[in-house]
Amino acid sequence: MITLNPHFLELKPSYLFTDIARKVEAFQQSHPDRQVLKLGIGDVTLPLPEPVIQAIHNAVAEMGTAEGFRGYGPEQGYAFLREKICQADYTQRGIGCIQPEDIFVSDGAKSDTGNFLDILGQHLTVGVADPVYPVYVDTNIMAGRAQQIVRLPATAANGYQPGPDNLPQALDLIYICSPNNPTGSVASRELLQRWVDYCHDHHALLIFDSAYEAFISDPDLPHSIYELPGSETCAVEIRSYSKKAGFTGLRCGYTVVPAALKVTAEGRPDEVSLRQLWNRRQTTKFNGVPYIVQRAAEAVYSPEGEQACAGNIAYYKRNAALLKTSLAKMGYQVYGGSNAPYVWLKVPAGFSSWSFFDYLLEQQALVTTPGSGFGDCGEGYIRLSAFGSYEATQAAVQRLQQLPRQI
Ligand code: MLT
């Protein structure tokens, strides 16, 4: 008899952004005359950079010739892209511990974050910040670890980046998202070093999600976990072209599993290379990212590509700055938005995250994301995304200014 994976029944009935999309759809249907402004899901709005488009055209033309056609590619990604990533994102930034063979090109950070659990043991205690990107939690619930998730409060008091002190119990697997989704906070070098040291002391693994690293402009803040000594033996890093280069629809990212990272299996004494196991998983379950998309990702690193992406990021950062400064002037408590595309806003007294979300939708046709959707500690906050157009962001600010001062 066929049965279900019972752990899927432990999940909330639907994914956060699906719930929001449903509410917005219902609002649009009942108010067809209102122009809805979307500061909800972190989806980019600028078109793909020109050098990326050109690379796609060239790759399509190549695929249409007998000499240039390619069928199945390497599951780990083509060497041209892995080498480029290694050189541009690591070697040239002074990180010598990463080799092209450590880099696995993927269809994005979200899927890799979940897929990586395939190769980890069942009885792990998992540490996540609260609020948190829901994928870390949901994928662990799907894998049967609902009772093994430890939520570490991320609050104004710790700069929305919890540290490894005074943990309620020892952790085996730790997720850090920096720059952070949803709070827009960024982990300092000192904090990350403490987490790396913690991992060494407790034989724990760190999954470092740096999907938003391109938004860091403060030179003191680390872009990669591998900037921290010792991290290559305890950390996996996951990156994405979604927000950096506008690939949310194109789909490409990568996961770094350093050769030096070794872990034992439960009940077995020998250390096994995590990279080797991830390679085994990928070659079985994944046929690689399309050649055309990998050529598009390669173009991100050309001088013209770098310049175009930097321009797009500056554009979104201007939106974030506009939101943050305008809301602060209006008297709201706001956080994030400086080295990240998200602004984290404390809702006015008397509101919950969801009731303020509903209020903004009903009163001003503004879509945000309720903080409680990211965890209990997100209650009392909403998240605003800076990925809209500048005009839409300005219009959103104007609508927020129209709200009564004392709601
Ligand atoms: C978000 O809005 O949190 C992100 O767009 C989700 C994602 O990147 O999957």
Image: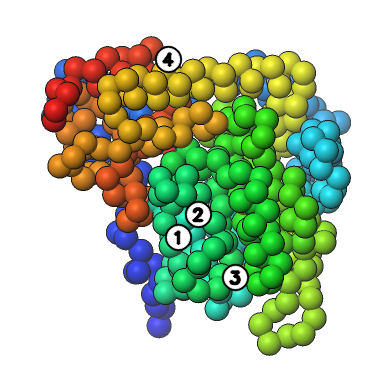
Residue bearing mark 2:
162
Q: Nearer the viewer, mark 2 or mark 4?
A: 2
Quick check: marks 1 and 2 in contact, CB under 8 Å?
yes
Classify residue 308 by image quadrant. top right
Q: To which residue does mark 1 refer?
A: 152
The CA span between labels 3 and 1 is: 14 Å
Q: Please give the name of the residue rendered at 58% of the width and 30% of the height, measured from the top-left corner.
A: 215
Q: Position of residue 383 (x, y in %)?
A: 36, 37
Q: Residues within 10 Å of mark 1 (few under 14, many from 20)?
A: many
Mark 2 to mark 3: distance in Å?
16 Å
Of tags 2 and 3, the one toward the viewer is: 2
Mark 3 lies on residue: 172
Closest to the camera, between mark 4 and mark 3, is 3
Q: Is residue 293 visible?
A: no
Task: Say if 280 sits above or below 6 in the image.
Answer: above
Residue type at mark 1 is: Leu
Dot 1 and dot 4 residues touching (CB under 8 Å): no
